[in-house]
């Protein structure tokens, strides 16, 4: 079965459970899933109900699509994503993104929890992603090009669209949130980085590091979706403090940041819907 056939099969499966056309797709990262519990829900579909869908194994990731409305905006939300470090192929990791594109979503809003590399960032800060570094993970477009989705050699010069970034900045301003901005780098994980790796990543121009998002942004851009993203800086990266890193710390910080994060996402989605 080709990658495209697999996505079509998943789409058929979802369509049998719910008839809903989202305008915006949203991926909620570690500890940030609570946003989906607050929207006006039209229906949910567990990943495990979708035949051929890679199912998430990380604690703190629920693993379902939530369909509903943020204000008047129809959205599909991934409450929990699929990570490369879980052992899935990159093709499987980005399958849900392509699926949401085929559901009709024109824009993709990515969120994650990250380690802050920029010394000006603190734990609990939000960073608007303005570009990425993908060089440390396999490109999700490797293999036979999925022609139905996009072109063989897609341009990546403005993955995180300026007009969407402007809308997120406006939302932050309105909510009086000090929104940082920077470059996100994806590594495979699941181990956290070493201090030497963090120094390397800083030299390369990264402001925050994590284990997701970039591959999804590439696949979405390939499929013609308008992409934007916010990273919640859950901790200072390895070697920047004396503390060892734990997933619990990431989770705790994300939990603390959640109320403000929810407001920022909600307002941003309404702003973005008005311009796409
Ligand atoms: N490194 C990688 N991924 C992360 C981190 C980190 O420090 N914090 C949250 N996700």
Image (tube, rainbow, N blue to C red):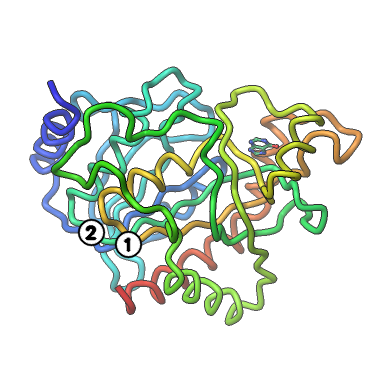
Q: CA distance from mark 1 to mark 2?
A: 13 Å
**Residue drawn at (40%, 68%) of the image:** 269
**Residue drawn at (41%, 27%) of the image:** 56
Q: Which residue is mark 1?
A: 40
Q: Secondary structure at mark 1?
A: strand
Residue furthest front as drawn: 153
Relative horizontal placement of residue 35, taking residue 11 as reference (left or right): right
**Residue drawn at (69%, 27%) of the image:** 192
Q: Quadrant of residue 160?
A: bottom left
Q: Quadrant of the N terminus?
A: top left
- N-term-proximal mark, 1 vs 2: 2
Q: Quadrant of residue 164?
A: bottom left
Q: Quadrant of residue 88?
A: top left
> Quarter of the picture for ligand 1?
top right
**Residue drawn at (59%, 74%) of the image:** 172
Q: Observer-nearest residue: 43 or 189? A: 189
Q: Which residue is mark 2?
A: 22
Relative horizontal placement of residue 68, taking residue 5 as reference (left or right): right
Tally of numbered tags? 2
Q: Quadrant of the C terminus?
A: bottom left
Residue 143 numbered mark, or none: none
Q: Observer-nearest residue: 187 or 78? A: 187
Residue furthest top as drawn: 87
């Amino acid at each position: 079965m080709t990658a495209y056939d697999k996505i079509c099969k998943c789409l058929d499966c979802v369509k049998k459970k719910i008839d809903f056309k989202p305008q915006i797709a949203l991926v909620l990262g570690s500890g940030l899933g609570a946003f989906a519990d607050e929207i006006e829900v039209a229906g949910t579909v567990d990943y495990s109900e979708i035949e051929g869908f890679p199912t998430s194994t990380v604690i703190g990731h629920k693993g379902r699509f939530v369909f509903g409305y943020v204000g008047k905006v129809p959205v599909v939300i991934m409450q929990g994503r699929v990570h490369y470090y879980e052992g899935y192929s990159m093709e499987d990791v980005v399958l849900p993104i392509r699926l949401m594109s085929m559901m009709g979503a024109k824009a993709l809003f990515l969120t994650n929890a990250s380690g802050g590399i920029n010394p000006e960032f603190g734990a609990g800060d939000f960073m608007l992603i303005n570009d990425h570094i993908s060089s440390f993970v396999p490109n999700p477009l490797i293999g036979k090009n999925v022609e139905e989705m996009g072109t063989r050699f897609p341009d990546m010069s403005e993955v995180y669209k300026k007009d969407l970034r402007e809308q997120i900045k406006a939302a932050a301003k309105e909510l009086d949130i000090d929104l940082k901005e920077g470059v996100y780098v994806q590594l495979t994980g699941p181990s956290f980085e070493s201090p030497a790796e963090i120094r390397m990543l800083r030299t390369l121009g990264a402001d925050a590091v994590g284990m997701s998002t970039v591959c999804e942004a590439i696949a979405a851009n390939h499929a013609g979706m308008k992409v934007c993203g916010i990273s919640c800086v859950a901790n200072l990266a390895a070697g920047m403090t004396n503390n060892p890193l734990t997933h619990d710390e990431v989770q705790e910080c994300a939990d603390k940041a959640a109320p403000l994060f929810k407001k920022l996402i909600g307002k941003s989605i309404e702003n973005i819907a008005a311009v796409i």
